[in-house]
Image: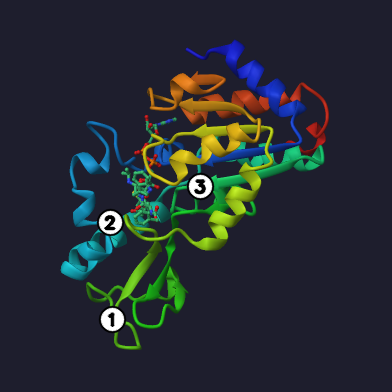
Amino acid sequence: MLTDANIRRAAEWISQAKSVVVLTGAGVSAESGLTTFRAPEEGMWSKYDPMELATIDAFNRDPELVTRWYHWRFTKALDVEPNPGHAALANLQRWLDGAHKRFTLITQNVDGLHQRAGSTGVIEIHGSILRWRCTETGEEMPLTDVSFETFPVPSEAGGLMRPCVVWFGEMLPPEAIEGATAALSSCDVFLSIGTSATVYPAAGFIEIARTAGAKTIEVNRDPTPIGGGVDRAIAGQSGVVLPHLVELLKQMGDGRDELE
Ligand code: BJW
């Protein structure tokens, strides 16, 4: 059941804001059919050990296993379609652009679904599964140029190809962190959507926004560690809540001509 008062209040804050930052996580892609990481029953980490798959040590130890897992993940990512939650965020960006407000979409997702839904300037803080790079030279290539005839995939320079994702213990792309921090430090409204808010530094973004004086909103299907501390917690599926939120904004004035 949608908590309409919370969604309405969130829409009012967004309509009054000069700068909005959204942080998304795996939950936003769940309704497209991609598995999240930490759900007790269906999450990937309930079946696989992240330390055996999402670290450079795991890759060095068993590059075949890790390459097969990421190959399966990117095949899935290409097979699915953006869902109404992705579309609503692209629509929100158009609405805010039309109202001359700043909008920054920061995603932890590596699946490219926000871009396929029409979002632009997306900050991918955990990289992308759609690009792979050589372990020797760092040269990146889109996945269409990577031949998966063998697992692991050898690179021309004598190394291996690995996905351009950020594994545990690895630094996030500096330009992504800089862009995210700049936007968070000057936003009026911060939304955390479909993330368990457990992986740093992303889990700390809410504090940067709060310190900047932003109203904080969470949209999540389940309780999270930050849910009790946000200004408005909206319980529900992002593919249901976000279109409803954007529909309310449509009724509120500025920027509405930009909505489809
Ligand atoms: C719905 C829904 C629906 C479902 N609608 N909702 C400070 C303190 C403690 C530890 C650290 C710290 N700083 C750094 C660390 C270490 C580490 C870390 O955070 N560990 C924690 C586990 C404690 N961080 C790092 O290592 C990071 N690097 C770093 O900080 O470098 C500097 C440094 C290095 C060394 C030491 C110290 C500092 C890198 C983190 C990289 C994370 N990588 C992964 C894999 C990426 C590639 C891949 O995709 O395979 O990123 S792990 C995985 O978790 C993935 C995700 O992006 C990330 C976050 O997960 P997310 O998106 O929140 O998914 P879930 O499944 O957890 O949650 C989904 C949510 O959706 C749930 O709440 C559902 O209820 C909800 N949901 N359906 C709405 N329809």
Question: Would you say the beta carbon of the disc 1 residue lies within 8 angstroms of ligand 1?
Answer: no
The image position of residue 233, as x and y in percent, is: 51, 20
- Distance from label 1 to label 3 (Cα)? 29 Å
Compared with 209, 229 (above or below) is above
The image position of residue 104, as x and y in percent, is: 64, 45
Of circles 1 and 2, the one toward us is: 2
Compared with 32, 238 (above or below) is above
The residue that mark 3 highlights is: 107
The image position of residue 156, as x and y in percent, is: 35, 87
Query: Mark 1 or 2 closer to N-term?
Result: 2
Residue at left offset 22%, top offset 64%:
57
The quarter of the rendered structure image containing the C terminus is top right
User: Depth check: 33 or 193 in front?
Assistant: 193
Residue at left offset 47%, top offset 40%:
204
The residue that mark 2 highlights is: 54
Compared with 145, 95 (above or below) is above
Is residue 172 visible from the viewing direction of this image?
A: yes
Of circles 1 and 3, the one toward us is: 3
Amino acid type shown at disc 1? Pro
The residue that mark 1 highlights is: 154
